[in-house]
Image (cartoon, rainbow, N blue to C red):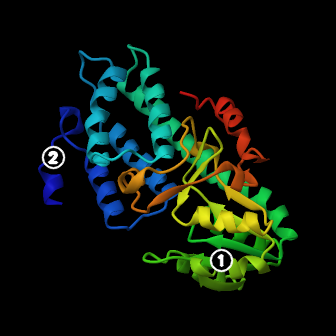
Amino acid sequence: MRRMSLLDSPSQGSAIHPAFIALKARCESREIVDLDAICIEFVAAFKQFILSYNKPSDKAMSRDVDALIKPQLSYITGGLPLPLAIGNLVKQLKQEINALSDDCTEEKGKQQLTDWLDEFVENRIQLAFQAISLFTRDKLKGAHVVLTYSWCPLVEQTLLAAHEDGVNFHVCVLDSYPCQRGKKLLNSLCKADISCSYGLITSVSHLIKQCRLVLLGCSAILSNGYALAIRGSSQVAMVAQAANIPVLLAAPTYKFVDKVQTFTEGHRSSCTALVSERMEMIPADLITAVVTELRILPPSSAPAVLRAKQLVV
């Protein structure tokens, strides 16, 4: 709070808005760890920044706001790259900012940008989660035993929604040290009276024999069909493929990025700003299908999704 009190208005150029300071602090303290939650909080911080903006009389809003967000992003990243999905969001937001006309008033510009941010959260995250849950429910009906790894809120919502709709299944939750985030999913499923078992990732070879389906979350789907997911996910997918068990990845289309990468290059490249979890690549040939809000697609359809959503850079 003492740091916040020393900051100037965001219209001063070099100042950092308190909303971005709070966001970074919450991520560093691991108060929020999931990418989707971070993305929603990122949008909320941007809204506060936009609403507190004061347009100079001698400047166009589009160019001024575009210049003012650069120090905010530099502060958040701290030398690390943004998560790929949030980088997508920033690129699209900048396009909306640059699309503002030079004679756009402050009130109109603020309204246009905040409406776009609200629509992004509603359509690309909240409604997308609901659609993905519906598509996955049909696959869960015949699965009987589902295996998942760590904790992903989309996977959690999907399993809970299917259970509420009367689908019966058993969930094997795999976890790993040191975070053991899978316990959060386990507690949530147990409270909903879903039959569960729990084990470390080292037991995947044993547990996979009991399963009919593997359901995983991810942080990004690349244009070559590779998926960026929490470390250990590729091991689960590899064991599943060897056992001829289908692997589904739940991913809203805002996580599709126009980037090609086949592996994570060492410790630093696996780290991103705001997200503390280490990530790794899941090869496309280990992924049976990706469940999006559009439909269930093979990973090779990633370029088509990017074109349809106009996410190609």
Q: Is residue 234 above or below residue 261?
A: below
What residue occupies the far right of the structure in this picture? 142
Q: Do the residues bearing badges 2 and 1 touch, measured as CB atoms within 8 Å? A: no
* Residue 251, x across and y down, in percent: 64, 52
- Give the mark nearer the N terminus: 2 vs 1: 2
Q: Which mark is residue 224?
A: none
Q: Residues within 10 Å of mark 2 (few under 14, many from 20)?
A: some
Residue depicted at x 63% and y 82%: 203
The kind of residue on which mark 1 rests is Val
Q: Quadrant of residue 52?
A: top left
Q: Residues within 10 Å of mark 1 (few under 14, many from 20)?
A: many
Using the image, determine if residue 136 lies above or below residue 166: above
* Residue 299 in view here: yes
User: Residue 311: x percent and y percent?
Assistant: 58, 32
How far across and down, in percent of the image, does residue 279 sit? Answer: 48, 58
Q: Which x, y percent locates residue 263?
A: 52, 49
Which is in the foreground here, disc 2 or disc 1? Answer: 1
* Residue farthest to the front, as pictured: 242
Asked where in the image residue 210 lies, by quadrant, the reply is bottom right
The residue where tag 1 is placed is 204
Relative depth, front residue between 283 and 151 = 283
